[in-house]
């Protein structure tokens, strides 16, 4: 009686597998599976923060792509997976962009089409161990080229880089100090590729295990030998987070609430008070009353106040428009230190190619007027004895996602990085947590502590190694808090050598292409048969019969 039952179960299993295979052979089911598989990595980012999931999140997508019947279908699966990834990582923009986010995801998702082709080319069918070993280097390198391309501000910036999901993993932060977030992304992709080979290519499992061992040894070597930031004192930094203030007169009421919270810091012996992005809604030269109130606060707490002005003004070159500017205010008023935001949020602060895409303002909350950009980074210096006090490197909101900006400020002498942000429009989404997590990576990359100060949360502070200092100020908080921030000196390898993993990835792809090109040239052209071989009993004029 057991044998027929076992046979029936086996037959049912085969039937289920056949139905699944038929579904995947349908372009609609296959397309839906690609979109869903591409969306999976979002679970590794805050707020879920399943950081470990990043190391297997791409396996379903890669298994699907490698099984594509043609190279063209693999490219389509890559594109559709890219759409799923972009929508999932930026889902919190849906209330602002509405259906336009699908249009953007479809355009940006095209960058994954060559990657899909690459995965199938290297891992499709039954690849040899050598080809699978090449895939362990080339597939991550191909993904890194996508991250590099979409990190351009005009394409949305480096939000959702896969390496950024490891912001709370200490060994990954050590890797970031050597090669930036790019090196962490390569590690994550290499492990995903190795697991894909383990699952789908039994003949190449030795190569996959070897790849995992190389990843583990590399991480261990970095952990043991990469230089650590050397502590060089401490600074007492206060963050003022007024919380959500909506309705008529919200700008003035937010300023008043920030004023109230700042007064509570009197007697705390702080070195600097930081307000969030757009905390002041008028140019301080046009509103001397606001400048005077800020000067009074500075005298009350015994420290300068770094505010952020979101207002219309004319700069020294004669440009007139809306700037977002970090402005330092001391006991006598504005000190003259000002940084104008250089990299603006596409659609949020300007419309790329407005003549073509200006219609986005009619379907969402896109910028009705383009903000103006600053022209250079600025390092501000607090008052101090001798050669001066603490050197600050300000960034505004979106700019904390760019590794090169914090690296440049560090090379210019900044001892403390500060990001002033406002995620008020995205309360209740994963955006505030994701944004705050970026400061941990920037701190680890640069070997400098970083303060992430917001209007409405999440505000956080990270030490020179990317470890968190003190507690978070969540999205439900309207408060002020101070932090004893460790300072550091010395230079990380990333600050010294920059984006070398990107160049290494380019070299890998070039080597793989060159190798394949050489093999293609050595193969005989199809259709060219070898000349006939004549025996002793035949000739060209007297063929054998």
Image (tube, grey):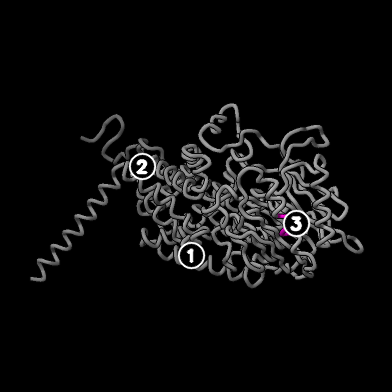
**x and y, in percent, of residue 189 in the image:** 50, 57
Q: CA distance from mark 1 to mark 3?
A: 30 Å
The one nearer the camera, 520 or 536, is 520
Q: Which mark is residue 410?
A: 3
Give the residue furthest to the bottom.
224
Q: Is residue 158 magenta?
A: no
Give the CA distance from mark 2 to mark 1: 32 Å
Q: Residues within 10 Å of mark 1 (few under 14, many from 20)?
A: some
Whichever of labels 2 and 1 marks the residue nearer the N terminus, that label is: 1
Q: Earlier in the sequence, mark 1 or mark 3?
A: 1
Residue lying furthest right: 386
Question: Which residue is under mark 2?
Answer: 70
Whether residues under marks 3 and 2 lie with C-beta atoms below 8 angstroms apart, the answer is no
Circles 1 and 3 in contact, beta carbons < 8 Å: no
Nearest to viewer (mark 2 / mark 1): 1
Q: Which mark is residue 52?
A: 1
Q: Left or right? Give the position of 303 relative to 322.
A: right
Q: Secondary structure at mark 2?
A: loop
Q: Earlier in the sequence, mark 3 or mark 2?
A: 2
**Span highlighted in magenta in the image:** 258-262
Mark 2 burial class by Cα count in 10 Å: few <14, some 14-19, many 20+: some
Residue 110 in view, yes or no: no
**x and y percentages locating residue 4 in the rendered image:** 9, 66
Seen from the viewer's position, the closer of residues 94 and 400 is: 94
Q: Nearer the viewer, residue 507 or 65?
A: 65
């Amino acid at each position: 009686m057991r044998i027929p039952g076992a046979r029936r179960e086996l037959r049912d299993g085969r039937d289920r597998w056949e139905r699944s295979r038929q579904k995947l052979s349908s372009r609609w089911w296959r397309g839906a599976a690609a979109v869903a598989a591409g969306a999976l990595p979002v679970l590794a980012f805050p707020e879920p923060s399943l950081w470990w999931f990043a190391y297997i999140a791409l396996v379903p997508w890669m298994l699907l792509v490698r099984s594509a019947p043609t190279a063209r279908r693999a490219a389509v699966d890559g594109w559709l997976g890219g759409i799923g990834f972009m929508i999932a990582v930026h889902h919190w923009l849906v209330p602002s962009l509405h259906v336009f986010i699908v249009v953007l995801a479809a355009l940006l998702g095209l960058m994954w089409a060559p990657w899909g082709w690459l995965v199938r080319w290297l891992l499709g069918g039954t690849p040899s161990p050598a080809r699978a070993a090449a895939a362990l280097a080339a597939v991550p390198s191909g993904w890194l080229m996508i991250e590099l391309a979409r990190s351009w501000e005009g394409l949305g910036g480096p939000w959702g880089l896969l390496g950024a999901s490891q912001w709370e993993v200490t060994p990954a932060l050590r890797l970031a100090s050597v090669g930036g977030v790019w090196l962490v992304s390569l590690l994550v992709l290499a492990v995903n590729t190795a697991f894909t080979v383990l699952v789908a290519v039994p003949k190449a499992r030795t190569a996959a295990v070897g790849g995992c061992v190389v990843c583990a040894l590399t991480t261990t070597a970095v952990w043991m030998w990469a230089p650590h930031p050397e502590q060089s004192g401490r600074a007492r930094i206060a963050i003022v987070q007024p919380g959500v203030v909506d309705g008529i007169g919200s700008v003035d009421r937010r300023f008043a609430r920030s004023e109230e919270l700042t007064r509570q810091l009197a007697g705390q012996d702080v070195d600097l008070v930081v307000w969030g992005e757009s905390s002041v809604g008028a140019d301080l030269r046009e509103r001397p009353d606001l400048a005077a109130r800020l000067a009074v606060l500075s005298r009350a707490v015994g420290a300068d106040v770094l505010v952020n002005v979101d207002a219309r003004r004319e700069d020294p070159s004669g440009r007139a428009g809306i700037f977002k500017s970090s402005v330092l205010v001391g006991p006598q008023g504005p000190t003259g230190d000002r940084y104008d935001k250089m990299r603006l949020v596409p659609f949020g602060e300007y419309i790329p190619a407005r003549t073509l895409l200006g219609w986005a303002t009619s379907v969402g909350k896109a910028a009705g007027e383009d903000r103006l950009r600053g022209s250079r980074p600025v390092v501000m210096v607090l008052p101090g004895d001798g050669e001066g006090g603490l050197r600050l490197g300000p960034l505004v909101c979106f700019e904390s996602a760019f590794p090169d900006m914090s690296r440049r400020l560090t090379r210019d002498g900044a001892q403390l990085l500060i990001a002033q942000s406002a995620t008020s429009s995205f309360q209740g989404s994963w955006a505030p947590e994701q944004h705050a997590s970026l400061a941990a990576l920037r701190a680890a990359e640069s070997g400098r502590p970083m303060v992430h100060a917001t209007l409405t949360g999440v505000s956080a502070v990270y030490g020179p190694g990317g470890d968190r200092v003190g507690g978070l100020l969540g999205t439900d908080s309207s408060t002020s808090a101070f932090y004893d921030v460790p300072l550091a000196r010395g230079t990380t390898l990333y600050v010294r050598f920059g984006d070398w993993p990107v160049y290494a990835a380019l070299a890998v792809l070039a080597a793989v292409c060159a190798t394949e090109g050489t093999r293609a040239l050595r193969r005989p052209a199809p259709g060219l048969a070898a000349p006939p071989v004549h025996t002793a009993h035949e000739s060209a004029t007297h063929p054998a019969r």
